[in-house]
């Protein structure tokens, strides 16, 4: 991520328009399992998401990532779409079972070649590749050996990081170890609404630690293989947790959820220790003896920036009894994704929601960014995901009219700009997502793309929001209202 000047430029002639700093990086994001398809091609083996999605009842409509957007074959067209948007960067993830099919041992040349071609094409079009090593698609063989609750998975991740860095490190300058380890640990092993679908709170906490360790070992492996100008980061879906009232009980509920949503990751990664209150709140579930001497030191590697994913705030209160958790929009389960949070109730914030049922609240993003700045001064931030699903359709003129998404993006980019004005060092923004894609347990029913995908024909149709975003990217200026010109 190039260093952006922190000066916020005057907005030109349109009153109320907001100019982003020169060098601010504009991008779009995707993830391998959500778009690639080609699940069985060129030596790729199943990941936990192949297994999970092929298990009846796990994913809406029985959808799988077998074909997805067929990006594995249409990647050149997709890069051309990005070039049309004018974005300066593309955040994508590498499929671990495509490049190291059993999760250990030698790399698959064909798998690496796919990403090598993609990177070359991006660079040829002037688009900076931003590579995420792990966006949830653990090789099934590693899950069969115990998955993230097992320490060895972290060691295997470091080996995989070395393989990918060795193959692409001459061209990819920006690297992210994990995407949203909260989801991998707590939706995957706690509530079970994500792959591998296990429901054991102690295992979920073990998984969280081994994901943290994987991050730390992964950064060390990257630094060992990459040129010194490469940048290393992690992406967290930091939750902006609000308490329903100012009562002591409600504020304590918010503290607990903040602990297992955010600080269980930022503590070891950015401070070199697990927060004492998180260890206390979860002591009835585990004694944390899986944390070995030296682990937190290995986890807390210096980072070049922190990736922040934000969609919606989280509103909580104290609950009168156990079982009142909800899955915070990630899918229904009788098991909680919040270890130590059994006595916390979740509430839907007032106001409009997206098709995911997530509240639309850009003020949460502003407050989150200023808090991260206060908690970790000097750490550059990049919004690695932000966007919204709506019930988009192609109208009789062949167009996709999505004014709600434009309003959502406008509101959240205004929040980012306000945060920059308030002195937060935000270096870039990646719209989730480039394409409509496989939205995990929701299958293809939720459309997050700036570009509509007709799954029957694989035809791509840029939505009105894509044209809108292209103008913002081109000008580096946000218009005063969603539908005004800058
Ligand atoms: O689609 C997901 C993505 O894979 C991770 N972050 C949230 C997005 C929307 O749910």
Image: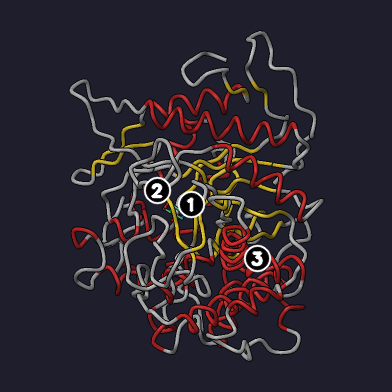
150 or 77, which lies in front?
150
Residue that carries the numbered disc 3 in the rendered image = 263
- Which quadrant of the rendered structure holds the C terminus? top right
Query: Mark 2 Cα within 10 Å, few/some/many (few <14, many 20+)?
Result: some
Q: CA distance from mark 3 to mark 2?
A: 37 Å
In the picture shown, does residue 34 fall above or below 272? above
- Identify the residue shown where x is 71% and y is 44%: 370
Which of the marked residues, 3 or 2, is nearer the chain's N terminus?
2
Please indicate whether residue 174 sits to the left or right of residue 198 in the image.
right
Q: CA distance from mark 1 to mark 3?
A: 35 Å
Secondary structure category for the residue under label 2: helix
Residue that carries the numbered disc 2 in the rendered image = 75
In the picture shown, does residue 53 fall above or below 485? below
Which of the marked residues, 1 or 3, is nearer the chain's N terminus?
1
Which of the marked residues, 2 or 1, is nearer the chain's N terminus?
2
Checking the image for residue 118, the label placed there is 1
- Identify the residue shown where x is 73% and y is 29%: 22
Checking the image for residue 231, the label placed there is none
Please indicate whether residue 118 sits to the left or right of residue 306 in the image.
left
Q: Is mark 3 within 8 Å of ligand 1?
A: no
The percent position of residue 62, horizontal first and vertical second, equals 19, 63
209 or 107, which lies in front?
209
Q: Hey, which quadrant is residue 291 in on the image?
A: bottom right
Q: In the rendered structure, are the residues bearing label 1 and label 3 in contact, judged by CB atoms less than 8 Å apart? A: no
Q: Hey, which quadrant is residue 57 in on the image?
A: bottom left
- Identify the residue shown where x is 56% and y is 77%: 157
308 or 257, which lies in front?
257
Q: Hey, which quadrant is residue 169 in on the image?
A: bottom right
Q: CA distance from mark 2 to mark 1?
A: 7 Å
């Amino acid at each position: 991520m190039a260093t952006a000047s922190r000066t916020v430029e005057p907005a030109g002639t349109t009153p109320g328009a907001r100019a982003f700093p020169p060098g601010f990086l504009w991008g779009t994001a995707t993830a391998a399992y959500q778009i690639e398809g080609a699940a069985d091609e060129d030596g790729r083996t199943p990941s936990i998401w192949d297994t999970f999605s092929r298990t009846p009842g796990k994913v809406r409509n029985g959808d799988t990532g077998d074909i997805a957007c067929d990006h594995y074959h249409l990647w050149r067209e997709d890069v051309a779409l990005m070039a049309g948007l004018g974005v300066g960067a593309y955040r994508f993830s590498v499929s671990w079972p495509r490049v190291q099919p059993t999760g250990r041992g030698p790399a698959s040349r064909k798998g690496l070649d796919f990403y090598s071609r993609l990177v070359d094409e991006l660079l040829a079009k002037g688009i900076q590749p931003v590579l995420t090593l792990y966006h949830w698609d653990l090789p099934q063989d590693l899950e069969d050996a115990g998955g993230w609750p097992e320490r060895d998975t972290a060691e295997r991740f470091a080996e995989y990081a070395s393989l990918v860095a060795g193959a692409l490190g001459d061209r990819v300058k920006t690297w992210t170890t994990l995407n949203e380890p909260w989801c991998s640990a707590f939706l995957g092993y706690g509530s079970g609404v994500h792959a591998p679908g296990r429901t054991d709170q102690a295992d979920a906490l073990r998984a969280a630690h081994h994901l943290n360790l994987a991050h730390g070992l992964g950064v060390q492996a990257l630094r060992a293989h990459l040129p010194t100008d490469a940048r290393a980061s992690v992406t967290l879906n930091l939750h902006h947790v609000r308490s329903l009232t100012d009562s002591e009980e409600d504020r304590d509920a918010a503290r607990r959820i903040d602990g297992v949503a955010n600080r269980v990751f930022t503590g070891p990664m950015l401070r070199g220790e697990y927060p004492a209150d998180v260890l206390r709140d979860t002591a009835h579930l585990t004694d944390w003896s899986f944390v070995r001497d030296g682990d937190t030191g290995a986890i807390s590697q210096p980072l070049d920036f922190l990736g922040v994913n934000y969609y919606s705030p989280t509103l909580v209160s104290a609950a009168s009894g156990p079982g009142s958790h909800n899955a915070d929009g990630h899918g229904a389960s009788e098991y909680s994704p919040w270890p130590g949070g059994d006595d916390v109730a979740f509430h839907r914030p007032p106001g409009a929601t997206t098709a995911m049922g997530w509240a639309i609240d850009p003020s949460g993003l502003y407050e989150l960014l200023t808090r991260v700045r206060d908690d970790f001064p000097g750490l550059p931030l990049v919004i690695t995901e932000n966007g919204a699903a709506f019930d988009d359709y192609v109208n009789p003129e062949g167009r996709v009219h999505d004014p709600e998404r434009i309003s959502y993006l406008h509101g959240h980019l205004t929040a980012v700009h306000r945060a920059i004005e308030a002195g937060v060092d935000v270096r870039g923004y990646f719209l989730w997502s480039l394409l409509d894609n496989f939205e995990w347990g929701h299958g293809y029913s939720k459309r997050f793309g700036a570009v509509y995908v007709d799954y029957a024909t694989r035809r791509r149709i840029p939505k009105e929001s894509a044209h809108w975003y292209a103008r913002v990217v081109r000008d580096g200026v946000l218009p005063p209202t969603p539908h005004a010109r800058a």
